[in-house]
């Protein structure tokens, strides 16, 4: 099987910054996403390769291992552990025989044999390794995460049906266990880590499970009081405006905010700020009435 160069997959050099990696991944993931390339097997394969490359290079720890060990980066810890054991054995041997020396080719064959599924020189055991984790980014609108909903993702040429819980936050990551890379020698599969990128195209500002909105209030209703219909995330409600309401006044609508993550039936609050609109293009009669009011005050 050909060795994959993750840098080449993303069109980058080994000196690429974290920002370069993220930018390249997003661009290519959009281009080859299965939703945009239905029934295109080449695009599916390319999408898989892009995700694998991003999983390694976007993680500083994994990238360091990859730069040092290449295609065997997942087994770097096992290699280091085996190397330490070999060093201890070598020192013990030197202490007994009084002879000095470095590793032989046979030593390295033992180390890599243990790492990649071969047997130790004594034929005693075969090592099992956990598969690599896959990272994916899922772009949603704020409206998409107001309620629980199901979505199908394509990972490793397989369709995975997942439930996205209401109240997921921008930048949050959830783990789908066992849907990452395949383990080696019957080792456990890795996991799929999905990070959410949530855009907000609504009139509401979100802060965790609370929502904030600014509502225009005409001068006359602000002075005399009255009723006002305002939008919430799931419909309209009627508010009673108190007489002499001041500009910037805030009111709280309890339970009209955003769903609390994984707390069914629980919601934050909606905070409304009134912004009083001054009338324009007054008629002569209106000006006269305001002048009369000014004299009374």
Image (cartoon, grey):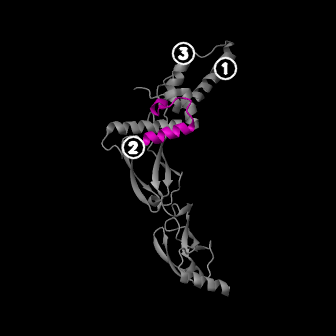
**Above or below, 63 relative to 35:** above
Question: Does residue 43 appear to the left or right of 193 in the view shown?
Answer: left
Residue interval drawn in magenta:
6-29
First-in-chain label (2 vs 3): 2
**Any magenta on residue 192?**
no
User: 291 or 11: nearer the eye?
Assistant: 291
Label 3 residue SS: helix
Label 2 vs label 3, nearer the camera: 2
Q: Looking at the image, can residue 110 be seen?
A: yes
Which mark, residue 33?
2
**Any magenta on residue 21?**
yes
Residue under pointer 3: 105
**Above or below, 29 relative to 297:** above
Residue drawn 47% across the image and 32% down it:
11
First-in-chain label (1 vs 3): 1
Residue 166: x percent and y percent? 48, 60
Question: Does residue 4 appear to the left or right of 75 in the view shown?
Answer: left
Label 2 vs label 1, nearer the camera: 2
Residue 79: x percent and y percent? 56, 28
């Amino acid at each position: 099987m050909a060795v994959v160069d993750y840098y080449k997959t993303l069109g980058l050099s080994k000196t690429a910054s974290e920002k370069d990696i993220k930018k390249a991944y997003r661009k290519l993931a959009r281009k080859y996403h299965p939703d945009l390339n239905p029934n295109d097997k080449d695009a599916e394969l390319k999408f898989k390769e892009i995700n694998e490359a991003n999983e390694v290079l976007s993680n500083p720890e994994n990238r360091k291992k990859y730069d040092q060990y290449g295609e065997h980066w997942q087994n770097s810890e096992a290699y280091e552990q085996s190397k330490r054991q070999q060093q201890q054995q070598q020192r013990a041997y030197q202490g007994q025989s009084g002879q000095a020396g470095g590793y032989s080719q046979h030593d390295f064959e033992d180390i890599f044999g243990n790492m990649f599924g071969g047997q130790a020189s004594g034929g005693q055991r075969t090592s099992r390794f956990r598969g690599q984790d896959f990272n994916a980014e899922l772009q949603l609108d704020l409206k998409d995460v107001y309620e629980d909903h199901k979505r199908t993702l394509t990972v490793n040429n397989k369709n995975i049906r997942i439930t996205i819980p209401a109240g997921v936050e921008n930048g949050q990551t959830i783990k789908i266990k066992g849907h990452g890379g395949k383990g080696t020698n019957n080792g456990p599969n890795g996991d799929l880590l999905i990070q959410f990128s949530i855009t907000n195209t609504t009139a509401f500002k979100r802060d965790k499970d609370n929502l904030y909105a600014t509502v225009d209030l005409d001068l006359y209703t602000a002075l005399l009081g009255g009723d006002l219909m305002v939008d919430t995330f799931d419909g309209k409600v009627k508010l009673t405006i108190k007489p002499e309401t001041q500009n910037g006044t805030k009111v709280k609508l309890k339970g009209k905010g955003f769903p609390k993550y994984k707390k069914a039936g629980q919601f934050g609050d909606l905070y409304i700020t009134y912004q009083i609109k001054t009338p324009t293009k007054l008629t002569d009669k209106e000006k006269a009435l305001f002048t009369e009011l000014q004299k009374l005050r």
